[in-house]
Image (spheres, grey):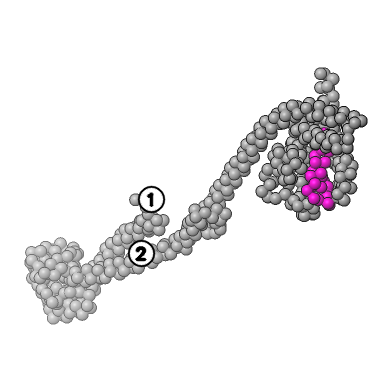
Amino acid sequence: MRNRLSLRWVLIFQVLAPLLAAMLVFTFIGLRTLEVALEKRLQEDVELVARAVRLPISHSLERGQQADVRQALESVFRIGRVYGAYVYDTEGDLVAAVGAVNPAPRTRDVARMAAEGERQGAYQQIQGQEVYSYFLPLSDSGGRISGLLQVTRRGSDFQNLVSSLRWQAGLVILLAGGLMSLMVLVGHRRAIGRHFEVLIGNMARVEAGDRKHRADEDGPLEIRRLTRALNTMLDAVDQAQREVAERREAQGRLEEQLRQAEKLAAIGRLASGVAHELGTPLSVIDGKAQRGLRRSDVDDDRAATLKQIRGEVARMEHIVRQLLEFGRARNRNLRDTTLGVLVAAAAGALEPLFNEHDAVLDLRPPLPDPPVLADPVRLEQVLVNLLRNAIQAGARNLRVEWEPDGEDGVLLQVHDDGPGVSEQDRPRLFEPFFTTKSVGEGTGLGLSVVHGIVQEHGGEIRVIDSETLGGACFLINLPLHAADAGQEERHEQQGEKQTS
């Protein structure tokens, strides 16, 4: 049952209701105490009236002046606080009476009370009405009991006053309880309820899918702590989701790299086998064509045919070399070098190609040029392949620049103003035998070899659009090693060679 109640009803049942019950109990106890005190006060008023007329009545009774006795009783009745006043002699006979009803007590009872000389007060029924009677002995000048004075007051006077007091107390309790309930509920609404509604609304937004939403820390300290805990939990959930996504992405990359490596290894083994099988027949064909050209009786048509055969053989030998280069697992000859030297060597090797296509190469080395630990021949081959591909794709302006990438790397950039690489071709750009050139113009192994060499050096290569020249831009991240690290690796390689 408690779990199905709102905080407002829990507050009413567990705080407000016990508080009102306690207030009722204490009010009842206080009212009862006040009633007893009030009743005692009313009885004392009757006693005071009786004592006030005791002496005049005693003197008049002693002198036998009944008219004076009655006059004294009438003065008591005119006070308005009594119901009746009566005087009895020592025998219990009524001497004088003033009041609406004659109580007519038993004579022996009156004689006994007069003889005892004690003051007494008690409730009694007089003709169907409850009255309070106070009996006061009268004495003469010699101190002897001469009679008995009885002063009465209606019991309804007590009851009406007590009833009025109860009604007033009930009304006060009702108003106080209502005011207290209103104050508690309004206070709950202003202090807690509205903040919980805002917090529930924030949680509903998160549940609806707004995972970036965070609740404002407002309200009492406990509400702020709860809001802060909610925000912290949401941040932790987002962080965990990001970590899971990053791990899945990293796992996907690793799996893709593993599949790519397995595919490249299989293709490499196949390429090496095909290259070895084609090498000998191509050498025989080239040798036969060369000897045919040396004969003196070869006419011009046959000479042209033999030269064409040798040209196609040379082209096939170039393809075979690329296959061997792709499939061969080479030992790295790492040494300290700078990218400036490698870029200059690649530019020199391609100078005839640049002159043939009127291409311009812009080199922008950093100062100072950071040293790298690399295989110069292999890394130069990377630059040669990238620059040659750019020129063959139609680029006429090329730029090579590099700069430090953090504290332990270098970023090499090769820009061109060619047609660039389309988004759909980029995922397969470094796959073996994938080419965008026409049939017979490329083998699709150049960029695969580049990708393998970069990975051998522990780096990464990717292609983006060149913001500088408008074509393609190849970005190569290579690890940066100090000269002493390269020296240590050279010493280790030399030691291994000497040992072997």
Q: Secondary structure at mark 2?
A: helix
Is 341 above or below relative to 25? above
Label 1 Cα neighbours within 10 Å, binned few <14 / some 14-19 / many ≥20: few
Identify which residue is drawn at 86% across, 49% down: 357
Give the camera-side residue of 130 and 334.
334
Residue interval drawn in magenta: 373-402
Res. 261 image quadrant: top right
**Drawn side of residue 104 relative to residue 265, left or right:** left
Give the camera-side residue of 130 and 107.
130
Task: Identify residue type, mark 1.
Answer: Asn
Give the camera-side residue of 2 and 249.
249
Task: Identify residue type, mark 2.
Answer: Gly
> Percent from the top left, x then y, of residue 216?
56, 58
Residue 388 part of the magenta-drawn span: yes
Is 396 above or below relative to 484? below
Q: Label 1, on which residue?
A: 3
**Drawn side of residue 34 relative to residue 129, left or right:** right
Report, in whole angstroms, how far the alpha carbon at label 2 lies from the one at label 1: 27 Å
Q: Secondary structure at mark 1?
A: helix
Q: Label 2, on which residue?
A: 177
